[in-house]
Amino acid sequence: MHTELLNDLRNQNPIVFNISNFVTVQDVANGINAIGASPIMSQEIDEAPAMVQISSAVTINIGTLTTKQIAQAKVVGETANQYHKPVVLDPVAVGAVKYRLDAVKELMNDFKVDIIRGNAGEIAALADIDWQAKGIDAGTGNQDLDLIAKTCAQKHQCTVILSGVTDVISDGEHVVHVKNGTTLFQLHVGSGDMLSSVVAAFAAVNDNLFEAAQTACAVFATTGQIVAERLQEERPGTFSTELMDELHLITVDEINAKLEVESK
Amino acid sequence: MHTELLNDLRNQNPIVFNISNFVTVQDVANGINAIGASPIMSQEIDEAPAMVQISSAVTINIGTLTTKQIAQAKVVGETANQYHKPVVLDPVAVGAVKYRLDAVKELMNDFKVDIIRGNAGEIAALADIDWQAKGIDAGTGNQDLDLIAKTCAQKHQCTVILSGVTDVISDGEHVVHVKNGTTLFQLHVGSGDMLSSVVAAFAAVNDNLFEAAQTACAVFATTGQIVAERLQEERPGTFSTELMDELHLITVDEINAKLEVESK
Amino acid sequence: MHTELLNDLRNQNPIVFNISNFVTVQDVANGINAIGASPIMSQEIDEAPAMVQISSAVTINIGTLTTKQIAQAKVVGETANQYHKPVVLDPVAVGAVKYRLDAVKELMNDFKVDIIRGNAGEIAALADIDWQAKGIDAGTGNQDLDLIAKTCAQKHQCTVILSGVTDVISDGEHVVHVKNGTTLFQLHVGSGDMLSSVVAAFAAVNDNLFEAAQTACAVFATTGQIVAERLQEERPGTFSTELMDELHLITVDEINAKLEVESK
């Protein structure tokens, strides 16, 4: 696990361009900023190519997808492919809402996604594996999470992060588990979206995207765990505030001291 | 007062679908999540029916209304009526901006609203009672608040929450006062919007909507009061963070110990 | 420096209307509210004239500009000119994205902007001075900041705030430095946008806009500095929460005791 990538990220301060949902966008921007990258957001298709060109990585989050945003995402994805900028996709609620699943499938025909980050319900839907997603939540199912992540990665020929109590990361061949984390992530709505954009920030500073994805999960999950362990109770508001603090303050040594990673 | 509905809400974890304004949407989502329900938001008319069908209640907040959103709200309201999902309306600034009052009146012709939650200026406007609203704030007027809430409820044949220092809840016949609360609610912009969606979460787990509305106000106002009493000064930022904590931690016993309710 | 304007602002509680970007809008609304003014936001061109008429000042922030928003901004700016309401412009990323620079130039042909608030990269772009802006960040350049602010103010015949480690405020003739502040402002994405709307709140209560701009910077920078000095470490999350607290609690005497201002 190359946790020292965190120092590269902070030294390079890469610009991460985000097609964001309006629910969690403020947290996402602040999270990117706190960890040491530079966020930029846009809703306008006419500036999409310029946005991609000034950025080092792109996140497409469909949390509040509109038809207008689908058109914007198409241009962004195609331009990112053209300029070889990594594309991270966060397929919010594709397991629960057919409109979103159809839209995402269409987008993935138009351009190549390099990393997908979602919960079990979302990744299962993109792997065509049966699962009962619940709204924006993971929901429940009987399938093996490793198999879901691996199948999704193979199907779309990309790196997949199935995040949850344990983050499962696969490139279609290998599977890595990041076992750090806290239940407080589920109590704060922006956690998953923030992780997706943190993944893009790491992808901006490392060409090995499977490695970047693992490191991003390791840094984010460990930071959250450290914050949660300091709190005496489940305090989602305080957790959110102190997560922002700690994303800025955390060091590679602190992460390494906590890290629990398994290669399967 | 059926404060034990809070436990039902937490056990059932209902999905609450929100047409939100982009100012307070993050707080609303986190508030719904913290108290024990599951938020989902959308801006796209094409997924509106699906969103309603996976949800147990709907909130329509017009805080940053657009013509596109009016069209979306129409489909959402009609689908909710069809599938018997309770509809909560938050008529932000209808007392100050004619465009919004007209839009809301049109929507209320198209579908049935089950609960309206607003401040004095907004409820007075929907009751056709003279009042000087001020932007998004309640403003000032000489009319009796009980009369305003009751008239509005009669006129629209629904439950009305006129929230303020004292929350006045009416079904058109009865009036209940929840006297808990804190001035800090006015210092945090998202408070009212959060309450409206918390009302929807309670409406999702109890068919008696007048009862659900009272309980939502009781839980929300008491939680805010408990947080405010712990602070030594008026700290709107800290209040907002700790309100999120307390919405998750508060118990029925703690609420009952503080509750000040009056039936008029 | 007329820091006692803060008391006027709190006594008058002016409505500030904001065309906001969806990234920082919640912070902007809460910041306006916390300091003692009343925020209102809108995305709909059809209610634009009404919004301006009920407000005492207007902020146009282009942080997530769309073609639709350009049309709305045009109506808002023209109506504000007509009704003599001060207009504050926040030209987010005009130094880095040509689409935005073109849009802003077009808007400034359509109506008069009274105060521009941006970072060095943004103000340099509007002054036609060479500078390397970086996304939403100031970037780097060799030009004198006083000259940039002064040139921009002369070119657009308005007051200019070039904010940064030192805030440089110019009316095209005079230049004032507010040397207060903290590096934590850069670590919290909403800081600049909040300042722009706080500037509008002061412009709403004082006809001398150069004076209003200076006072807004003095109050905001000093408040941030006081919060930062209390923190032992660079904690962007806690800073953001306590900045909101302090914007509400800060007194004119506390500001005067800290203030470091220079007239050049």
Image (cartoon, coloured by chain):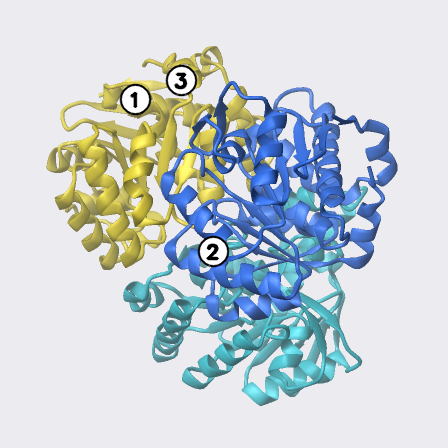
Chain colours: A yellow, B cyan, C blue
For badge 1, the amino acid type reads: Ala
* Residue at the farthest right position: C253
Residue A51 on image: x %, y %: 33, 37
Residue C80: quarter of image? bottom right
Residue C181: quarter of image? top right
Compare residues B167 and A73 and report the one nearer the observer.
A73
Q: To which residue does mark 3 refer?
A: A12
Compare residues A103 and B132 and report the one nearer the observer.
B132
Q: Residue at x 67, y 46 (%)?
A: C198
For badge 3, the amino acid type reads: Gln
Instruction: Please tell me whether mark 3 sits on a helix, a strand or a loop.
Output: helix
Q: Nearer the viewer, mark 2 or mark 1?
A: 1
Say which mark, if any, is on residue B37.
2
For badge 2, the amino acid type reads: Ala
Q: To which residue does mark 1 refer?
A: A212
Q: Is residue B141 above or below residue A228?
A: below
Q: Are marks 3 and 2 on the same chain?
A: no
Q: Residue at x 37, y 39 (%)?
A: C98
Q: Is residue C258 above or below residue B236?
A: above
Q: Nearer the viewer, mark 3 or mark 2?
A: 3
Give the crowd class for mark 1: few <14, some 14-19, many >=20 residues within 10 Å: many
Q: Is residue C235 visible?
A: no
Compare residues C137 and C187 and report the one nearer the observer.
C137
Q: Quadrant of the C terminus of chain A?
A: top left
Which chain does tag 1 point to? A
Q: Is residue B212 visible?
A: yes
Question: Does label 1 or label 3 sit earlier along the sequence?
Answer: 3
Give the crowd class for mark 3: few <14, some 14-19, many >=20 residues within 10 Å: some
